[in-house]
Amino acid sequence: MSANDDQIAQTEQRFEVRFPEDYRRFLAAEGSIARFVPPADDFLMINTVEELIAVNEAGDFQERFPGSVVIGGDGSRELLAYDFRQEPPPLVLLDVSAQDWSSAVHQAPSFSALLEQFPETGWKWDDSEPSPS
């Protein structure tokens, strides 16, 4: 098990979840994204595994959104989070000021489906591993 695999396992243990395999592979291979993606030049940020615990604890997200794990966002008000109340956990957008799940907006059924919405990130997914294009 690599150091990054250890960090992923420790983060999963902290939140008492098992991240979906596509997201685990992304964390192990690439680790993060922070870039503007066309066509609308939306900013997409996916946090590193090292940042996940601090990001989630900083905003009291576990209290406001039980079963959530924030993994990124748009660098402003929208947070990208897994909703572990469901199996498999979908990705949703949460407003940083929201008080509960009532304002969550469904974003994607999986991490790979999310990145497929932004082909400009350069990642192509298959059943085994992501690879840069």
Image (tube, helix red, strand yellow):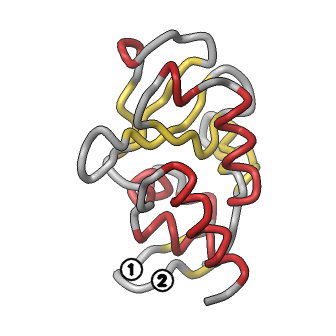
Residue 96, visible in the rendered structure: yes
User: Circles 1 and 2: CB distance less than 8 Å?
Assistant: yes
The picture quadrant where one finds residue 61 is: top right
Which amino acid type corresponds to the residue marked 1 in the rendered image? Asp
Which residue is at the far bottom?
Answer: 1
Query: Does residue 23 lie above or below 99 as drawn?
Result: below
- Which percent across, then down, holds residue 79? 59, 31
Q: Which residue is mark 2?
A: 129
Figure check: 130 above or below 19: below
Q: Residue at x 53, y 52 (%)?
A: 118
Per the image, label 1 sits on a secondary structure element best described as loop
Residue type pointed to by label 2? Glu
| Identity of the residue drawn at 67% across and 87% down | 2
Res 126 label: 1
Q: Quadrant of the C terminus?
A: bottom right
Q: Residues within 10 Å of mark 1 (few under 14, many from 20)?
A: few
Q: Position of residue 42 (x, y in %)?
A: 65, 35
Viewer-side residue, 47 vs 120:
47
Expressed as whole percent of the image width and height from the top left, the position of residue 27 reads: 62, 68
